[in-house]
Image (cartoon, rainbow, N blue to C red):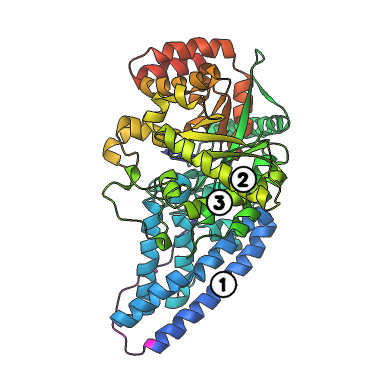
Amino acid sequence: MSFKGIAASDGIAIAKVFRLEEPNLTVDPHEITDVDAEIVRFEEAIKKTVVDLEAIKIKAAANLGEEEAMVFDAHINMVNDPEIREQTLAKVKEGLVNVAWAFDSVANGFVAMFEAMDDEYFRERAADIKDIKKRMLSHLLGVPLNDPSTINEEVVVVAYDLTPSDTAQLNRNFVKGFATNIGGRTSHSAIMARSLEIPAIVGMGTILEDTTDGQLIILDGLDGVIIPDPTDAQIAEYEAKIADFKAMKEELKKLKDEPTITKDGHRVELAANIGTPEDAKGATANGAEGVGLYRTEFLYMDRNELPTEEEQFVAYKEVLEEMKDKPVIVRTLDIGGDKELPYLQLPHEMNPFLGYRALRICLDRKDLFRTQLRALLRASVYGKLYVMFPMVAVLNEFRDAKQALLEAKAELIAEGIEVSEDIQIGMMVEIPSAAVLADQFAKEVDFFSIGTNDLIQYSMAADRMSEKVAYLYQPYNPSILRLIKMVIDASHKEGKWTGMCGEMGGDTMAIPLLLGMGLDEFSMSASSILAARKQIGNLSKKEMEEMAEKALNMSTVEEVMALVEASAK
């Protein structure tokens, strides 16, 4: 018998189970008479939580490094967030209810907002809110939390979920891997597992309930499989796999500073998707040849007002300096739809994904857009900046956005501020209308970057967050492949290039097809880069072209997948 989940961090572990169970932090509302006492209780809980987080940050720096420890600065900011504080105390005062219930209610509202987001990176940030909620409630209710830092023997940690606080306290000398009931590849637990370089499987459903303390298991983070109570033969088999995996990791490290070239001499570029300046360090450590997508939304979130030009300038400058002479593609503000900013008071819409969002907001709110463009242009002299506009539907939107950038540039030059003269200006192709008209856009852009996450759901008219229509989220459907090929061909005809920053760019099944269709740049999570470089190095561009041509003329996604699988064999 075995259990299957999402392989979140590569590797294999053979060890006993350590079940990390959550304490009961259930809180019910009850009427209070002393509002001031509740306020004092709340302020004390905030102070204690900040002390906890400062201590965990020190442990995280020792276990994970300074870069990963910085997530706890964000947690401390969330605990001190005036919006959360004001909403909580308003509930206490207006409803005369206990502060623990009021805080729990407010925190759950923020969790729901993040979990409703379409972008997986931001959807997984709900885990941050849950983490601080758990720690705050432990102090408000007087219930102690489990302490994973007390683990002192080799184990595989099994939990419902692992918060950033939990993972930061794991000692890699003893914790050989972990498995959780919930989570995805971009959750903090998965990201930190990759930083710790320990195998992890998430989204296993009921693994916490299906295992017992002290039970011997094999955790295969390569295939996302757990084998309980393995036989001697299975243990021997997986010990051999562990040796092979270690050897393969050492081989991959040799590719860090190598170019990405197919076995018949065709070169492509592998870039990293990042969300914060800290992520850029992970990109360089994993051999990224650039940043293919720098999401700037994080600068605008978890705060109560728009970031200043100076705040943005510092963040952009840090990434450009880290990447040195490698290209950094910065996506301008992409909010609305699933990414709400309460302080902007965006209008409520029946279908926000097709509404007032991303570039549409920026072109309407020129003040907001101008601030970001000025910050980007000021930072441009510190590296190789490319600017990319999201959610472009018609040619005039791109023209208007480019004009706004050129006006900001002229303004800065007039002020005596230096701006790079070598900035490429491109756009994301995530709306079918832009893909179909790519031949016209290609005359005016410097590059395309295909955002497959939205392009697929818009093309298939299927919300990828809806379980009922999830079967229609088909990256390898011939219709999607044809749109991608149309965009690539259009760019090449005008002497331009096309990259891909959607999830498909780092998909091992998609890479051969994309290579065959002529994609120039693949952007993915930093941890996927070296494996992708090896995969591409073993492929023939000519053979992939022949395979892609067959795929483009197929009728169903099943036929395409079978073709790629047969080719891999």
Name the residue tied to disc 3: 372
* Earlier residue among tags 3 and 2: 3
Which amino acid does the dot numbered 2 rest on? Lys
Real-space Cα distance between discs 1 and 3? 32 Å
Q: Position of residue 241 (x, y in %)?
A: 60, 31
Q: Is residue 32 magenta?
A: yes
The residue where tag 1 is placed is 50
- How packed mark 2 is, by other alpha carbons closer than 10 Å (few <14, some 14-19, many 20 or more), is many
| First to last magenta residue range | 25-35
The residue positioned 57% from the left and 29% from the top of the image is 446
Magenta region includes residue 8: no
Front: mark 1 or 2: 2
Q: Secondary structure at mark 2?
A: helix
Q: Is residue 532 visible?
A: yes
Position above or below: 516 against 255:
above
Q: Secondary structure at mark 1?
A: helix
What kind of residue is marked 3? Gln
Which residue is depicted at the point 29% across and 80% down? 95
Query: Which secondary structure type mostly characterizes the magenta part of the structure?
Result: loop
The residue at 50%/45% (across/down) is: 186
Question: Which residue is under mark 2?
Answer: 409
Q: Which mark is residue 188?
A: none
Residue sitting nearer the eye, 317 or 84:
317
